[in-house]
Image (cartoon, rainbow, N blue to C red):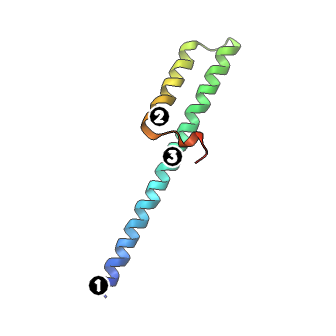
Amino acid sequence: MAGFLDRAKEQAQRGLAQGKQKVDEVQQQRAGSDLLKKLGTAYYAERNGSGTPEATQNALRALEAHIATHGDAFLHGA
């Protein structure tokens, strides 16, 4: 009986770890999408005369930093 409970506990812990990993991935994809949206907004504002090149560069740097840390899966819909 103890072996069964140990295996069940191990499976539950593995399932929790996989679930947490998936939640983390989704959160990083959302964060990347938000940064991409901010870059688009900054670029549009700059092109319309209500934004600055500095704001666009800052948004681009933030997006590049996110990609360097978390990858670019959010760009591919994965």
In the image, which disc is placed on residue 66? 2
Query: Left or right of 24: which side holds 45?
Result: right
- Residue 5 found in image quarter: bottom left
In the image, which disc is placed on residue 17? none
In the image, which disc is placed on residue 2? 1
In the image, which disc is placed on residue 27? 3
Classify 10 Å Cα crowding around label 1: few (below 14), some (14-19), many (20 and above): few
What residue do we see at 49% from left, 49% from top?
A: 25
Taking depth in this image into account, of 27 and 68 the one nearest to the observer is 68
Going from N to C along the chain, the mark reached first, 1 or 2, is 1
Q: Is residue 54 above or below residue 75?
A: above
Element type at marker 3? helix
Going from N to C along the chain, the mark reached first, 3 or 2, is 3
Taking depth in this image into account, of 43 and 68 the one nearest to the observer is 68
Kind of residue at badge 1: Ala
Q: CA distance from mark 1 to mark 3?
A: 37 Å
Where's the N terminus, which quadrant?
A: bottom left
Element type at marker 2? helix
Report x, y in % for residue 18. 44, 60
What residue do we see at 46% from left, 60% from top?
A: 19
Element type at marker 1? helix
What residue do we see at 68% from left, 11% from top?
A: 49
Query: Left or right of 16: which side holds 51?
Result: right
Kind of residue at badge 2: His
Q: In the orientation shown, which residue stands out farthest toward the left?
A: 2
Q: In the orientation shown, which residue stands out farthest toward the right?
A: 48
Kind of residue at badge 3: Gln
What residue do we see at 48% from left, 35% from top?
A: 67
Q: CA distance from mark 1 to mark 2?
A: 45 Å
Classify 10 Å Cα crowding around label 2: few (below 14), some (14-19), many (20 and above): some
Q: CA distance from mark 3 to mark 2?
A: 12 Å
Report x, y in % for residue 21. 44, 54
